[in-house]
Amino acid sequence: MSAGPAALAATYRLLTHLCPPLAVSITDENFTRRAEVDGHGVDAEGGGGAPDAVGVPGASGATGADRVTGADRVTGADGPTRAVGAPLASGVVRVSDLTVNGSGALDALIDGESERVAAAYGRRPRRDVAASRFLHHYLWSVGLLFTGPWYLAGRVPRVPLDRLTADPATGAFTLDARGLECGPNGDGPGGDGPGGNGPEVVRDAVAEHVGPVLEAFGPRVRRGPRALWGMATDDLASGLWFLGRARGEEERGIRTATALLPGGTAPFPGAAAFRVLRGPSGTPHPTRTRLGCCLYYAITPDEPCLTCPRVTDGERLRRLERT
């Protein structure tokens, strides 16, 4: 028996409570949660999208000001709901329009990201950098819409592209969750319960959603399929890592990310591959190296994100110990 919309909505409410930096508003029949974005939210591993650095010390090392696209403050609020298919607010675009040539949606989102970077850092990024930064933000945020319910309740939703909208002016997303359902409720990420929601179910659901978006962004970020799916892999791992830490169970978050991304699971090209670094005092610091570059270094070349392939383990330890 599938998990109904009410159960999924309740899980999303818990997820947004646990992840204040998640720049996604969830709308259902009884609840609207808005993400407020002012251009200075939290960062993901030092580069935007996954807030491993703020409020969860040790996973990143970036500062709150490093996050260009995302939620800085999150408030719960009742508000108007929007019927599926109803007209959108001015400037807001449906994510499904990213796959439509000539819609202007993709350029609008990249333009908005470019403006936020320029406002935060005093210089306008290259076009491919702005596109990469927004894509990174999208993949981390949307990834949690799949992995969050799986981690918290063993549920795996299917989220059609036309249920998600994005505001180019703020970078915030809205998910219309009304009527969305999941497969059977299993025993959690282990996938060994009656629901059978194992890692492959999550990977399939994520791939179905993000595949067309990656294809649309490819020419703008000037990367091929392997690099794009590597970015998706990185952001899935990062989201689960953050969620585990937010619940005070970092080891479980890492185990779950490792089970989801063991390597050899196309189209995801690599593994979560966490490892532990130890400082002079023996303090353990879980870390990983990104499969691909999020191009955060192109904005702040003196301090790339802590999981950047350009950063040595020695430099990571120095920055982690500093925090």
Image (spheres, grey):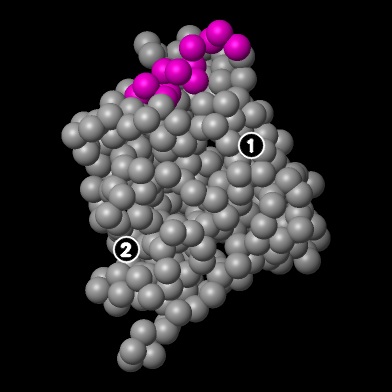
**C-alpha distance separating marks 2 and 1:** 29 Å
Q: Compared to 310, does 322 lie above or below?
A: below
Q: Tell me the quarter of the picture where residue 119 sits.
A: top left
Give 116 or 149, whichever is nearer the viewer: 116
| Residue topped by disc 1 | 224
Q: Residue shown at 35%/38% (left/top)?
A: 69
Q: Three-letter amino acid code at disc 2?
A: Gly
**Quarter of the image where the C terminus is located:** bottom left
| Left or right side of 164 for 17 | left
Q: Where residue 19 appears, x then y in whole percent?
A: 41, 52
Q: Residues within 10 Å of mark 2 (few under 14, many from 20)?
A: many
Give 116 or 201, whichever is nearer the viewer: 116
* Mark sitting on residue 167: none
Q: Tell me the quarter of the picture where residue 305 sits.
A: bottom left
Q: Check disc 2 and report its element: helix, strand or loop.
A: loop
Q: Residue shown at 45%/13% (left/top)?
A: 88
**Magenta residues, as a range?**
101-112
Q: Compared to 317, does 84 lie above or below?
A: above
Q: Where residue 230 appears, x then y in whole percent?
A: 61, 49
| Left or right side of 75 for 133 | right
Q: Tell me the quarter of the picture where residue 310 sits.
A: bottom left
Q: Three-letter amino acid code at disc 1?
A: Gly
Q: Is residue 265 visible?
A: yes
Give 245 or 53, whichever is nearer the viewer: 53
* Mark sitting on residue 61: 2
Is 307 part of what is drawn in magenta? no
How would you classify the magenta stretch by its main secondary structure? helix
